[in-house]
Image (cartoon, coloured by chain):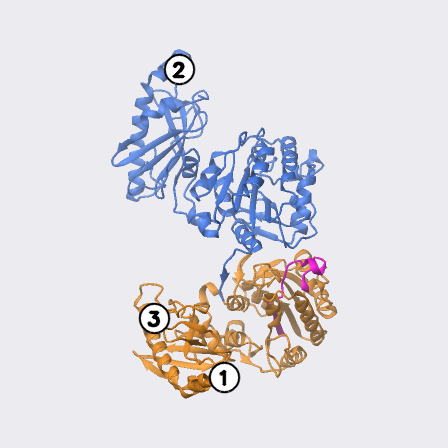
Chain colours: A orange, B blue
Amino acid sequence: MKVILTIIDGLGDRPIPELENLTPLEAARKPNLNKLAKSGVCGVMNAIAAGVRPGSDTSHLAILGYDPRVYYFGRGPFEAVGIGMDVDPGDIALRVNLGTVEKNFNIIDRRAGRIENVEPLIKDLNDIVLNGVRFSIKAGTGHRAALVLKGKNLSQEISDGDPHITGVKVNKILPKNKTSAAKKTAEVLNKFLDKAYKLLEGYPLNKERIKNSLPPANYLLVRGVGKLARFEPFNEKYGFSKSCCIAGAGLYKGIALVLGMDIVEVKGATGLPNTNLERKFKTAKEMTKVYDFVFLHIKAADSLGEDGNFRGKKEFIEKIDKASKHFLNLKNTFVVVTADHSTPCCLKAHSGDPVPLMITGPGVRTDNCFKFEERECAQKGCLGKITGLDLMPEILNLIGKNKIYGA
Amino acid sequence: MKVILTIIDGLGDRPIPELENLTPLEAARKPNLNKLAKSGVCGVMNAIAAGVRPGSDTSHLAILGYDPRVYYFGRGPFEAVGIGMDVDPGDIALRVNLGTVEKNFNIIDRRAGRIENVEPLIKDLNDIVLNGVRFSIKAGTGHRAALVLKGKNLSQEISDGDPHITGVKVNKILPKNKTSAAKKTAEVLNKFLDKAYKLLEGYPLNKERIKNSLPPANYLLVRGVGKLARFEPFNEKYGFSKSCCIAGAGLYKGIALVLGMDIVEVKGATGLPNTNLERKFKTAKEMTKVYDFVFLHIKAADSLGEDGNFRGKKEFIEKIDKASKHFLNLKNTFVVVTADHSTPCCLKAHSGDPVPLMITGPGVRTDNCFKFEERECAQKGCLGKITGLDLMPEILNLIGKNKIYGA
């Protein structure tokens, strides 16, 4: 039995007056998703708990069966792994923006004029060792990068350097508690950021940018610090021989990599509304020939919700529905479709409203829920209301892979 | 966004043959409550957990978001605070009946002939210090009072003095474990109760009562011992600027005060079936002009259930429905209506049956539940079945005030 777990990020929503008080999902034409719902068992899910507003990282950990209350110590490591960096349990990682500061460290631009490639600028910052801590840095997309600290006695309990606004000075990194680890980590990171500033400031590429009236990328604005926990590999935990992830955005690849999944790259998988849904769904289906478990992540429903673009969200869902035709009538495969959290257009933010969930596959208790919608799944679904941590046990149960508890 | 949380104490019930197998709530004419249900999202709730029979104190703590497994060490402190006593974290408080005992401490009357005002009798007992423990006592209604012990190393792990029946001797207070704190608390309390007996026995007012063939109020029957936990203030916990409580009964005011809410006194709010519901509901609505969060407590549905008076309970619910007209079509306000527990008339006691729950306000996922009833809310409500500890997160989520967990 194979499993395709499809997470449509930020799918859930609230009734929208302009859509006749339907949610974008309820308003969308979605014959394929509805066919799947009709052939499956439905319900609703709160990734963390009722009413709790999940982050993108914590919700995915919970859904994949890793309690974030145990395994989550900040987002940085997943982002760093997601762009191909080497992060080990205990390492500290941070997200980085290359920004522009004045001589007095006043921030002029948090994205250095949306500079497109920072790799040439930061390559000299790589592998610097200070007080026994090794710093690695790697470029992400655009002005973004990630920074990894390897060393003994490091802590994620430090403050952000990035104040998240311009017109103010950068923040010194401060320890959040009195442990020697937090103090040491803050100190050595401040030292590194100073050194980085001096190097970046004098860098010919930056001098050239100034000459061309472009803001120099002269400061590393760090945020999202985290420490990587030690995870039991996904395949071992659940008895899969191979599992993989298909995703556009780095965070989800990072989480999958940390858990020991393979990454299947799909051309045109951008994590944006223009992503190649057709190819992603088709690839997910094909990958069940090779993998026991395929984790398919679709990002843009969340971004459209955060923009408050309910028509865009509805249309994007309709595109997902078209691509979902690849999931109809699969043999020996359980198709799970759900979301990590709601992103109501009226809030333009993640929310704790439950998300719809459906599981189709041989032998499931099909119910009277014939539409893959927030309210229909809540009112008619046989799965009831579960949490993210319940999902993997439910899936393992249906495919007959869960271990007996007791005798 | 404002919130009115309405707790109808003991509202839930079981089908009653004389009401054509409907519950009092199902049998009641309640057009306004049903209108609210239709415009809102519904569900059912167990304050503590499925099947668990909650006390009045533990259920309210849970519903307001304070896990009683962490914050509950007995009822006494809430009762003491509710009648205006000063209780600090770590203090021990007990409920007191002024009763009548014979010379051999045999109890003749647990309420001293339902004596109406005990303040003149107990005022000399106030501020007595024994072994470094200061005793404060204050009259409640009728024969009732509360007793507070302030001192170092005190414990709530002691037995009741009140055997809850007459014709037997009063109980000596015993430590429930071997800690020095429990031993010390039992000892000093026994010493105080002896001293109080001697003072009360010789008190002219009591001699006068005997002369008038009234039982003297000569013994402090103590019960409901508790230690006050340290609570994070409600407003800080949830980011409200101001919150208030409207209640007739002392316990609920006590809980609200301990959590840092203001008490809004309403003339005619008695906590009895004769309470001025009209004025309580109207005041709750008006208070949303001043307060972010209004906790409205209605007591008598519980007492009527405990009397097994199902017709009275139905009629009282119909009066609540009339007063609920003030909650129709409110702007920028979430109206939450639920109960702390069921008090089925057939049991004449609290039960663990879930209670109906509805939340109305802008943007909620209205469902097909058009009646505010136990079974309708369970079968058609989109909120599903939640626990008391889930309620505040659900409310905060809907009003957009819950913090993100993760990033």
Is A128 placed above or below B283 here? Answer: below
Residue appearing at x 55%, y 78% in the figure: A241
Is A355 placed above or below A129 here? Answer: above
Q: Which residues are magenta?
A: A1-24
Q: Position of residue B24 (x, y in %)?
A: 65, 37
- Within-10-Å neighbours for mark 3: few <14, some 14–19, many 20+: many
What residue would you read off at disc 1? Answer: A117
A193 and B387: which is toward the camera: A193
What residue would you read off at disc 2? Answer: B209
Residue sticking out furthest to the left: B131
Is residue A228 in view from this perspective? no
Q: Secondary structure at mark 2?
A: helix
Query: Which residue type carries mark 1?
Result: Asn
Give me the chain letter of mark 2: B
Query: Which residue type carries mark 2?
Result: Arg
- Within-10-Å neighbours for mark 2: few <14, some 14–19, many 20+: some
